């Protein structure tokens, strides 16, 4: 990497912190997600700033929140965490247009191949541009030409474009956490040419998989035929005539060691044992997701119904546990999805329950980390069947927590994780209920030796390609002046 004095400026829609109130008043606490776990040490070492929205609309009643005291709270945070926070205040109208509108009603469904769910309102696009401009102003204000600017995700695809249009020169990298769709789908976006051009303004554009990068390049070729790709590896150079940028695959991961260590702790093992005991040592199939229509939860419950219909030998011998973390609860579509899932769970349990056995257990809540790890450690089969997913960290977390090495991962072929894990996971089509039922039946009957061989390979893959390697490989590709000799993730 370049000189250690080069600071890192991370930019994301939301700041990686939570505001919590205790007996001492409001405090800013660092979040516990994988991204912040991996970025925090780098930010601390190099120094830097994280720019994002706090989550509270700027026009909300300040009496309800900690806003008046925010500067002091942020200073306290910086003293402890070793990096600065910078909020971009957004009004309720901006949140509605840019976040709920353009990001969640257009880009999210379109990039997950679900274009029929898109609402292409022009006002969403205008709001998205306005808010991106606001973010870019904050980046310009809070960074210097020596800093490396790392933009996260689909909410902020116009950052490099606006920085350049303001005449602000920065070395910029962008990482897309969700899939990039094939050109036939991307071309449906009314603002496709402007959006793809904006992406070409970054110095480095990172995707989860090589396929995502190829999809991007295919759309680019259609919309900007002057683009010429050089190179073949995980990272390629795209020449645009008078300028060039790089595009690469950087599959995101988890802090493997932290998950595995937590799964070995006595209190977590105790929780796992209690769960097994409560379910009378039946085999456990586990699903864990943010409640979102891309995660394929209704389809998964239907495949459990098919499993129980086709294989009566499993009655009384297996439990399916679905844990769903509440997400975007204020949106009607998500409310409807929640109701649909609850009805389906009721239907399957109504069809198969017998005294002493209720096949499906459904939890709709955010679980504390140790409890979630306890579920992972107890499960015999991890059932991860998104209809489409950028990566899917649950698949990796399940394997990391399976210290006994006797679990089976049944994984959607449409999760980005399948590109890395396909050789040792049981791959399924999430729309194929019969196929999933068959795969589950086989997985439940797999010989212990076979399970161990495959789980050991999965764990080794994830251990090597962990979240720290992800950060490192992206930053090396972004900051290095040449492509020579930077460690690539195994894609
Ligand atoms: P997400 O769509 O949020 O992320 P995912 O990668 O599965 O999806 O991560 C979900 C996270 O939520 C996991 O870390 C999991 O542990 C946690 N979680 C789920 N249910 C929980 C519960 N009930 N309680 C507590 N925690 C829970 C987006 C993309 C993904 C991509 C990631 C990272 O959509 O494809 O993998 O970003 O790039």
Image (tube, rainbow, N blue to C red):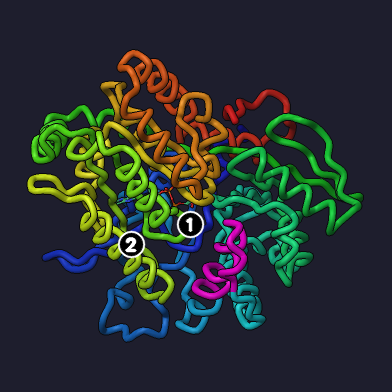
Q: Which callout, 2 or 1, points at the residue further toward the start of the chain?
A: 1
- Secondary structure state at the residue bearing disc 2: helix
Q: Residue at x 87, y 44 (%)?
A: 228
Of helix, strand and loop, which mostly describes the magenta segment? helix
Q: Position of residue 167 (x, y in %)?
A: 75, 65
The image position of residue 221, as x and y in percent, is: 84, 51
Label 2 – label 1 distance at C-alpha: 13 Å
Magenta stretch bounds: 98-118
Q: Quadrant of residue 236?
A: top right
Badge 1 is on which residue?
294
Side (left or right) of 157 relative to 61: right
* Position of 272 relative to 79 (above/below): above
Q: Nearer the viewer, residue 484 or 440?
A: 440
Instruction: Say above or below: 127 vs 138.
Output: below
Instruction: From the image, tell me which residue sits under label 2.
Output: 341
Check the picture and name the quadrant holding the N terminus: top right
């Amino acid at each position: 990497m370049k000189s250690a004095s080069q600071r890192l400026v991370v930019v994301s829609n939301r700041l990686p912190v939570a505001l919590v109130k205790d007996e001492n008043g409001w405090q800013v606490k660092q979040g516990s997600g994988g991204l912040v776990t991996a970025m925090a040490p780098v930010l601390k070492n190099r120094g830097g700033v994280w720019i994002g929205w706090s989550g509270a609309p700027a026009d909300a009643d300040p009496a309800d929140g900690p806003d008046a005291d925010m500067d002091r709270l942020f200073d306290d945070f910086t003293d402890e965490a070793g990096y600065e926070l910078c909020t971009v205040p957004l009004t309720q109208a901006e949140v509605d247009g840019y976040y709920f509108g353009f990001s969640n009603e257009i880009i999210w469904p379109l990039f997950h191949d679900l274009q029929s769910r898109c609402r292409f309102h022009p006002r969403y696009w205008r709001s998205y541009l306005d808010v991106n401009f606001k973010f870019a102003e904050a980046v310009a204000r809070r960074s210097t030409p020596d800093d490396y600017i790392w933009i996260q995700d689909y909410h902020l695809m116009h950052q490099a474009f606006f920085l350049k249009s303001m005449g602000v020169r920065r070395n910029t990298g962008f990482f897309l956490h969700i899939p990039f769709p094939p050109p036939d789908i991307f071309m449906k976006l009314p603002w496709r040419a402007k959006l793809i051009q904006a992406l070409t303004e970054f110095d480095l554009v990172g995707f989860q998989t090589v396929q995502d990068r190829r999809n991007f390049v295919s759309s680019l070729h259609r919309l900007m035929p002057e683009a010429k790709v050089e190179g073949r590896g995980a990272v390629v150079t795209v020449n645009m005539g008078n300028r060039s940028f790089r595009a690469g695959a950087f599959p995101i991961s988890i802090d493997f060691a932290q998950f595995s260590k937590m799964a070995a702790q006595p209190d977590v093992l105790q929780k796992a044992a209690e769960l097994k005991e409560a379910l009378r040592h039946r085999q456990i199939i586990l699903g864990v997701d943010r409640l979102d229509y891309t995660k394929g939860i209704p389809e998964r419950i239907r495949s459990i119904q098919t499993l129980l219909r086709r294989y009566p030998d499993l009655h009384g011998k297996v439990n399916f546990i679905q844990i769903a973390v509440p997400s975007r609860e204020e949106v009607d579509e998500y409310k409807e999805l929640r109701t649909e899932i609850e009805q389906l769970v009721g239907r399957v349990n109504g069809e198969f329950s017998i005294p002493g056995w209720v096949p499906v257990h459904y939890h709709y809540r955010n679980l504390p980390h140790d409890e979630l790890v306890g579920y992972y450690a107890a499960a015999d089969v991890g059932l991860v069947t998104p209809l489409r997913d950028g990566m899917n960290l649950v698949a990796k977390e399940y394997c990391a927590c399976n210290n006994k090495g006797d679990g089976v991962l049944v994984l959607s072929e449409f999760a980005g994780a399948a590109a890395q894990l396909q050789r040792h996971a049981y791959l399924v089509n999430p729309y194929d209920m019969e196929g999933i039922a068959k795969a589950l039946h086989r997985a439940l009957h797999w010989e212990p030796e076979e399970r161990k061989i495959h789980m050991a390979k999965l764990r080794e893959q994830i251990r090597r390609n962990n979240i720290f390697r992800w950060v490192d490989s992206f930053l090396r590709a972004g900051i290095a002046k040449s492509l020579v000799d930077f460690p690539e993730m195994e894609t």
